[in-house]
Amino acid sequence: MKGLIRAILAALILVLAYSGLEANQDEINHQVDKFGGSITRMLGQTFQKIPAWKKNRAEARAVLAEIQAYPEPLPVPSDQEIFSWIKSLANTPHRRPGSPEEFSAGQYLVQELQRLGIQEIHQDPIPVKSWRAKEWNLKVEAEAGFEDFPSFYVPYTGFTPEKGIEAEMVYVGAGRPRDFSGKDIRGKIVVGEVPFPNLPYGALIKLLPVYYISDPGKTIGFGFSEPLIFVRQNFMGYGTAQSHSENDLYWNAYENGAAGVLVILRDQPTNSNTHYGPYDGILKPTPGLWIGKYDGDQLRVLAQKGKRARLTLTGEVKDTVTYNIYGILPGKSERMMVIHSHYDAPFAGVIEDGAGCSQVLAQASAWSKIPAEKRPKTLLFLFTTGHFYGSNGSSTFAHQHKNDLLKKADLVLTLEHIGAKEAVEGADHQYRFTGQMEMGGIFTADNKYAIASVIKMLQKNKLPRIMSAPINFFGDAPPTDASGFVLEPGLEVPVLSWITGPAYLLCAEDTLDKIEVDRLDDYARAIADLVGYFSMVDSEKLRIGDGD
């Protein structure tokens, strides 16, 4: 009975965490619909998973003694060498899919793999439409005429004529159908706002059977939570004019004939407006601009008064090609372990995902120094493109290689945002560091030897604020770049997704000061330990749903 009560509480907390528009039953149901259906269905799905999670955890703990460390010392690079890779990747304003900056970063990774002695390197081309903004501007009517108003473009939205568009503003709140009811929108500029939920990590960890918590500083209490700024509750992305959520602010504005959309980032920390989302790669017809939350307080009032605005967003879309890049380091066996991150980024991308790529290079550096006859399995170091194009790089790699390379795989380990500092908004509306590392998770495949390997690594390395959780903790796949591997039909390889989610990820504030440099080799050593454990486990024991 106690376990059932805990499960009910956890499921309700998870539902409420994603329901932030309004605490009424209809709205909660609408929000939960994105995560599998009605509240009843979501509760049912959670209840159905809990026995399997408990069984997985118990079985993993029972085989912990079987998990053997790799017997050779692994020479992981120093903090400063790992940081040098991050700095080199972050030396351009962005690495957006299909851009020259992204191509340059990809070639740098090829050169580093070559320098580290990886001889077999491949580049798989992927066609994309490169969307690039050239100029953007917002001017809002004031007493002395039109005045500049801070803004940033919503990526993949439509372009205006060079002179922009001028129209009356209309405020529509969260942009639900009832928010548009009775309002004349056609030809006008809609002003709405997007909320972001807080994820109650502390409560979920206490109430649900996660596999392991590494929190040596005991900093994760029941009330611990973090903002999820990639969960734009009423503008999630992946919608189209033909198919979208009933409560999608953008598409409701489009359907009502809006000439433009101004979107207030209601819960994004600080007054930042540089939010690169939705990054679904879907071209949208109506031009849109993001507005910081404190500037939004002023804009909301002006829109409610019916003031006019001039919105300009010009740019170009062109067909181009980008590349998945991978290098293969042979071992004694053709059985393979894939170590992966993505190299495209919305801005300088220190944490997103220079941090992940640098840790992939760290593993290439460490394992390439081990003689081939002492490497039990082959390693594949993978850098995918297109995370900011609907995560098409990882899903394309999974689809293209599920019948060759991935048929040999015993592990896909995706690394994202490793070494990120926790930062919160201070009284001055700027980011301040808390002195803690960002909370992270290792979403772990349904295999007792995989789970046991993660537990053993966390027990040994005592990393701060990391949980090992089931791969389906938040749905059928984790909300990470590993999802393409998890969701690819017929692909039966253990997937581990190691990720943190700092609030500055999608913003221009993702800068070099956000990385904890003196912990980088600690993470590299822990990742090497984890890869070492997998290298020592018999491949037959690592099949998904098996391992008995």
Image (spheres, helix red, strand yellow):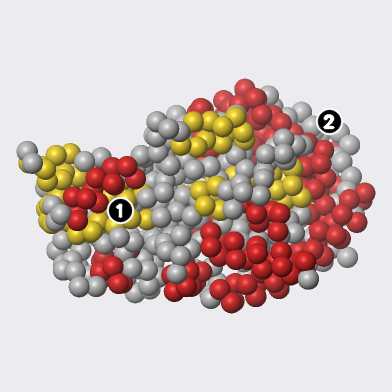
Q: Position of residue 169 (x, y in %)?
A: 17, 56
What residue is shown at x 70% (from left), y 37% (from top)?
464
Q: Is 299 situated left or right of 326 in this image?
A: left
Q: Secondary structure at mark 1?
A: strand
> Image height check: is 106 above or below 405?
above
Q: Disc 1 vs disc 2: Cβ atoms closer than 8 Å?
A: no
Rendering quarter of residue 395: bottom right
Q: Which mark is residue 73?
A: 2
Q: Is 109 situated left or right of 264 in this image?
A: right
| Camera-side residue of 143 and 53 | 143
Amino acid type, callout 2? Pro
Q: Position of residue 249 (x, y in %)?
A: 33, 63
Q: Position of residue 399 (x, y in %)?
A: 58, 63
Q: Secondary structure at mark 2?
A: loop
Q: Position of residue 510 (x, y in %)?
A: 46, 36
Query: Which image quarter holds the C terminus?
Result: bottom right
| Camera-side residue of 100 and 256 | 256
Q: Which residue is mark 1?
A: 263
Numbered disc in front, either 1 or 2: 1
Rendering quarter of residue 365: top right
